[in-house]
Image (cartoon, rainbow, N blue to C red):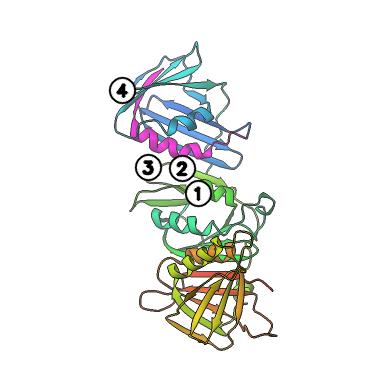
């Protein structure tokens, strides 16, 4: 068997499909299937919780009738090759050698050997429904911020309280991330394809991470899924699917209603984040950050337990019951990260001594005109000290 493909097309397909291969699973594989009738090379990878498939044009095909059309490849070796194969419109030639059971891969200036493994039946392509279409760059950007909230602890990932929740409606996609200490949700615009009513999907941190990748600006994704899998088809026709959690979504309404507005202030999000990160670096053995609200100077003091602090001057504030509120630094940063750039309003409960503190703080991103960005909801649990 011999055939050629374009380097940049092969690089794009492999860079995506290789994410579906898991070297730790015996039944995980990546396979090349040559469709000589349509002149296509189909790349498929699967694991227990993933299925990725894409195709690209193949030329110069030479194949005998008795030769197999499907070859399972060494996924570990292929992962290594992805980073060095050309990402340019140059020819990449494949030639199978039955005696050595390997593909010889040639470019104008290089040659590599890719081991071929024993043949096993290919898994059928999952049957999925096209739910809706979203802007690829917006989807990836939001998901990359929200996934930082979700716990990476494997023991907690099989639960509604620690996962990513996708809620699809006729013209909106709401992505929510939860763990036991933070909650974030962002709504983006979508256009309905074959969505029958609302659809709720829960996905683990590991699987959401597998779906995330760089996308071309202006490109679109078709969100697809079934009862067992969820993912998307990109503009190149590459299918990316991961497994879902078959559970009822967590009702977060009670959590979102537990915040109070006794004390509020508006600051620049970048300035607040920088202050939190700076005092955190000066506190290597303690992950606590304190926000002190004071009418003296009308400022917010960001400090650690070592006495280091940075003062932030709010652009507006209402301190009805000022005092000190404490957070775990990682939780606070994860909660404000999806807020985007610009001003953000922090809403806190009563901070006076002896008062019953509210359970969480709310962070409300503001639009350039000063109005609330209601498409984003962010909460962080405060520490009881």
Q: Is residue 290 above or below residue 179?
A: below
**Does the magenta portion include 303?**
no
**Residue located beneath label 3 in the image:** 236
First-in-chain label (1 vs 2) = 1
Vertical position of residue 30 compared to residue 221: above or below = above
Report if the CB atoms under discs 1 and 3 are less than 8 Å apart.
Answer: no
Q: Position of residue 163 (x, y in %)?
A: 60, 57
Label 2: which residue?
239
How many residues crowd mark 2 within 10 Å: few (<14), some (14–19), many (20+)? many
The residue indicated by pointer 1 is: 231
**Is residue 128 among what the camera can see?**
no
Label 4 or label 1, whichever comes before in sequence order: 4
Left or right of 214, for residue 332: right
- Residue ranking furthest to the top: 99
Marks 1,2: beta carbons within 8 A: yes
Q: Which residue is mark 4?
A: 108
The residues colored magenta run 1-24
Q: Where is residue 27 drawn, in percent x and y?
A: 62, 32
Looking at the rendered structure, the secondary structure element under dot 4 is: loop
**Callout 4 crowding tier (Cα within 10 Å): few <14, some 14–19, many ≥20:** few
């Amino acid at each position: 068997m011999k055939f050629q493909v374009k380097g940049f097309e092969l690089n794009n397909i492999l860079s995506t499909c290789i994410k579906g291969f898991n070297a730790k699973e015996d039944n995980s594989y990546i396979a090349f299937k040559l469709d000589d009738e349509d002149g296509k090379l189909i790349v498929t990878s699967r694991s227990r919780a993933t299925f990725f498939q894409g195709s690209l044009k193949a030329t110069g095909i030479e194949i005998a009738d008795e030769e197999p059309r499907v070859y399972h490849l060494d996924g570990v070796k292929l992962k290594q090759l992805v980073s060095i194969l050309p990402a340019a419109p140059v020819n990449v030639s494949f030639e199978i050698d039955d005696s050595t059971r390997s593909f010889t891969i040639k470019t104008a200036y290089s040659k590599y050997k890719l081991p071929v493994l024993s043949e096993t039946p290919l898994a059928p392509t999952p049957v999925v429904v096209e739910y809706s279409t979203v802007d690829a760059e917006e989807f990836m950007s939001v998901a990359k911020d929200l996934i930082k909230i979700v716990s990476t602890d494997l023991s907690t990932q099989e639960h509604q309280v620690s996962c990513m929740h996708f809620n699809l409606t006729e013209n909106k996609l709401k992505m929510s991330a939860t763990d036991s200490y933070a909650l974030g949700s962002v709504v983006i615009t979508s256009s309905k394809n074959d969505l029958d009513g609302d659809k709720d999907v829960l996905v683990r941190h590991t699987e959401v991470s597998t779906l995330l990748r760089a996308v071309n600006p202006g490109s679109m994704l078709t969100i697809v899924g079934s009862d067992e899998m969820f993912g998307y088809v990109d503009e190149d026709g590459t299918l990316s699917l991961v497994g879902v959690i078959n559970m009822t979504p967590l009702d977060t309404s009670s959590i979102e209603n537990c915040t109070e507005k006794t004390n509020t202030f508006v600051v620049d999000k970048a300035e607040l984040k920088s202050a939190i990160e700076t005092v955190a670096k000066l506190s290597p053995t303690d992950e606590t950050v304190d926000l002190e609200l004071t009418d003296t100077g009308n400022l917010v003091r960001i400090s650690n337990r070592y006495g280091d602090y940075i003062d932030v001057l709010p652009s507006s504030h209402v301190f009805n019951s000022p005092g000190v509120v404490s957070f775990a630094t990682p939780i606070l940063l994860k909660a404000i990260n999806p807020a985007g750039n610009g001003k953000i309003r922090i809403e806190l409960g009563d901070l006076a001594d002896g008062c019953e503190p509210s359970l969480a703080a709310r962070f409300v991103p503001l639009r350039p005109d000063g109005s609330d960005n209601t498409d984003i909801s962010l909460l962080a649990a405060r520490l009881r000290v």
